[in-house]
């Protein structure tokens, strides 16, 4: 029987439902937050009533004693939300899963990467099948330069032990404690044996509406739009009349639409009745699906003030990446966080240890224009899986178009283009698709397939599959042995 003292608990519970509701900003400047109350309450649990630190049932936090079939559960999230609640801060949407803090982060201003006192600090797994998934949360009780001091619930418990409580999770919960740690505040900082710092989520006082933007001077910029019909408010039941109106910002949320027309964006504004609220961008005149632009064709700003990563506009399939990803072709970077991708193609394997992925995702990079990034960097997905945040598979890129459809091949010598006399250089190249045509070859080696690609000189053209390395007659496969599809 092995007993291990771990430095950070895995708060493994059933995943919280995906947060569909968008944040609810207000127009006034946000008052100073009494975050010192959070720090004081959290620190007080290090020595409960002058004795030892708090545990799952002494004194207990939310459902820490009962959430696992009336037994103790992993309770780091219980502790963090309990402290926020005791200090007079919102806990809406939070539950016993540490990842719930990330899933509802948009309500709290979005996940950020600079700490402030009272923040929830999130940690994700760095290995295994749950790589990139948030499994631990703590509270920031001190910030000094590049260092933070945190208080965590549910750390230091005994694992790999069958205790009298009836199961390992209950045993761990009853033997873990509240603990204080100091570490670097940067995203990616290691914590414990298999976790790393993911980011931070603001604490919002109960007297401030969730999602209120910190506009500083109390001003709110208006963008003018036109609506083709009266639009109901999402939260308060008011109405925005049809015609020319102003809105403050947009936030991603539940889909509204009819037939093939739909929109996930919600627009925060002064309603004609019902005060300030969100209305669906579906009611904007003359715009496409998931478009939210002002009357001059400019993208509306997001309510959390970001234009990339969290809250990024203009995408098709939304995903979350656990760290910055480099571009395949142009050397750009896709920042960590919430991003959109267009489609996926199969290519060279990227991974570490037992974790790997062959899918490459085509997207707008944060630097470097359009490019491919490895699906290995997607949060919480298995090997060779590429799903969006709703669990829907990202579609494969279409063959022969400019948005992707690349299959990777190796050529053993430079190949001449069939139609324009350009050149495809020797080595690793991509092709879009293949067509049957005139035979090319020498001796007993030949091939009738022609591969459509971007030539190194001469623009787009076809080159003979005869020049593919290590393949037989009339064979045209990519580097992973998959047949290249026909054009």
Image (tube, rainbow, N blue to C red):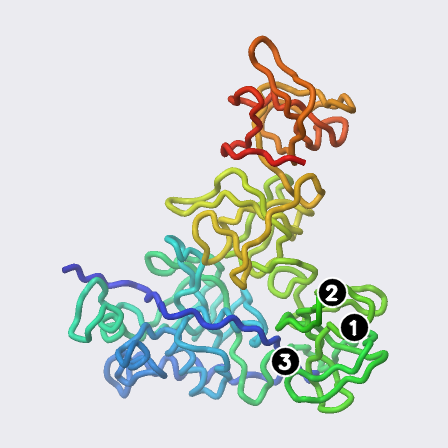
Quick one: SS at disc 2? loop
Q: Quadrant of residue 32?
A: bottom right
Residue 289: percent from left, percent from top: 72, 64
Q: Residue at 83% of width from left, 75% of height from top?
A: 226
Q: Are marks 3 and 2 in contact (CB under 8 Å)?
A: no
Query: Closest to the observer: 57 or 139?
Result: 57
Q: Which residue is mark 2?
A: 291
Count of number-bearing discs: 3
Cα separation between marks 2 and 1: 9 Å
| Mark 2 crowdedness (10 Å alpha carbons): few <14, some 14-19, many ≥20 | many
Quick one: SS at disc 3? loop
Q: Are marks 2 and 1 in contact (CB under 8 Å)?
A: yes
Q: Nearer the viewer, mark 3 or mark 2?
A: 2
| Mark 1 crowdedness (10 Å alpha carbons): few <14, some 14-19, many ≥20 | many
Q: Residue at 60% of width from left, 64% of height from top?
A: 310
Q: Which residue is mark 3?
A: 24
Cα separation between marks 1 and 3: 19 Å
Instruction: Choose the circle earlier in sequence order: 1 or 3.
Output: 3
Q: Which residue is mark 1?
A: 284
Cα separation between marks 3 and 2: 20 Å
Residue 346: percent from left, percent from top: 55, 41
In the displayed orientation, state which residue is furthest to the top.
443
Residue 149 showing in the rendered view = no
In the displayed orientation, state which residue is furthest to the left.
1
Q: Residue at 58% of width from left, 28% of height from top?
A: 476
């Amino acid at each position: 029987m092995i007993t291990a003292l771990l430095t950070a608990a895995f708060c493994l519970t059933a995943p919280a439902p995906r947060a569909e509701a968008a944040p609810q900003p207000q127009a006034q400047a946000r008052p100073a937050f009494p975050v010192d109350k959070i720090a004081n309450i959290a620190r007080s649990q290090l020595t409960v009533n002058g004795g030892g630190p708090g545990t799952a049932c002494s004194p207990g936090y939310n459902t820490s004693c009962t959430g696992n079939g009336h037994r103790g559960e992993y309770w780091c999230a219980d502790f963090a939300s309990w402290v926020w609640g005791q200090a007079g801060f919102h806990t809406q949407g939070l539950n016993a899963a540490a990842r719930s803090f990330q899933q509802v982060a948009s309500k709290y201003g979005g996940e950020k990467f600079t700490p402030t006192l009272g923040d929830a600090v999130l940690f994700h797994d760095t290995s295994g099948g749950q790589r990139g998934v948030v499994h631990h949360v703590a509270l920031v009780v001190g910030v000094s330069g590049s260092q933070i001091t945190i208080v965590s619930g549910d750390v230091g418990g005994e694992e790999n032990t069958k205790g009298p409580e009836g199961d390992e999770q209950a045993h761990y919960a009853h033997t873990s404690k509240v603990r204080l740690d100091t570490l670097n505040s940067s995203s990616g900082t290691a914590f414990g044996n298999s976790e790393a710092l993911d980011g931070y989520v603001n604490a919002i006082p109960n007297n401030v509406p969730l999602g209120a933007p910190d506009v500083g001077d109390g001003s709110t910029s208006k963008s003018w739009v036109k609506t083709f019909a009266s639009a109901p408010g999402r939260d308060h039941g008011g109405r925005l009349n049809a015609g020319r109106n102003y809105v403050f910002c947009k936030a991603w949320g539940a889909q509204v639409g009819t037939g093939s027309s739909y929109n996930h964006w919600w627009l925060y504004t002064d309603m004609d009745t019902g005060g300030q609220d969100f209305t669906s961008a579906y009611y904007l005149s003359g715009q496409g699906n998931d478009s939210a632009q002002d009357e001059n064709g400019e993208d509306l700003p997001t309510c959390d003030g970001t234009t990339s990563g969290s809250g990024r506009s203009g995408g098709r399939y939304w995903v979350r990446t656990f760290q910055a990803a480099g571009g395949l072709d142009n050397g750009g970077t896709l920042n960590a966080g919430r991003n959109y991708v267009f489609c996926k193609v199969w290519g060279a394997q990227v991974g570490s240890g037992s974790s790997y992925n062959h899918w490459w995702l085509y997207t707008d990079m944060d630097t470097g224009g359009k490019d491919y990034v490895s699906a290995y960097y997607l949060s919480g997905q298995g090997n060779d899986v590429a799903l969006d945040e709703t669990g829907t598979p990202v579609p494969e890129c279409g063959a022969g178009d400019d948005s992707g459809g690349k299959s990777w091949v190796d050529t053993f010598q430079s190949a001449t283009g069939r139609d324009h006399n350009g050149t495809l250089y020797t080595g690793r190249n991509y092709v879009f698709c293949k067509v049957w045509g005139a035979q090319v070859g020498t001796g007993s080696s030949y091939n009738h397939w022609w591969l459509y690609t971007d030539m190194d000189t001469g623009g787009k053209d076809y080159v003979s599959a005869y020049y593919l390395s290590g393949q037989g007659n009339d064979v045209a496969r990519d580097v992973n042995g998959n047949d290249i599809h026909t054009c």
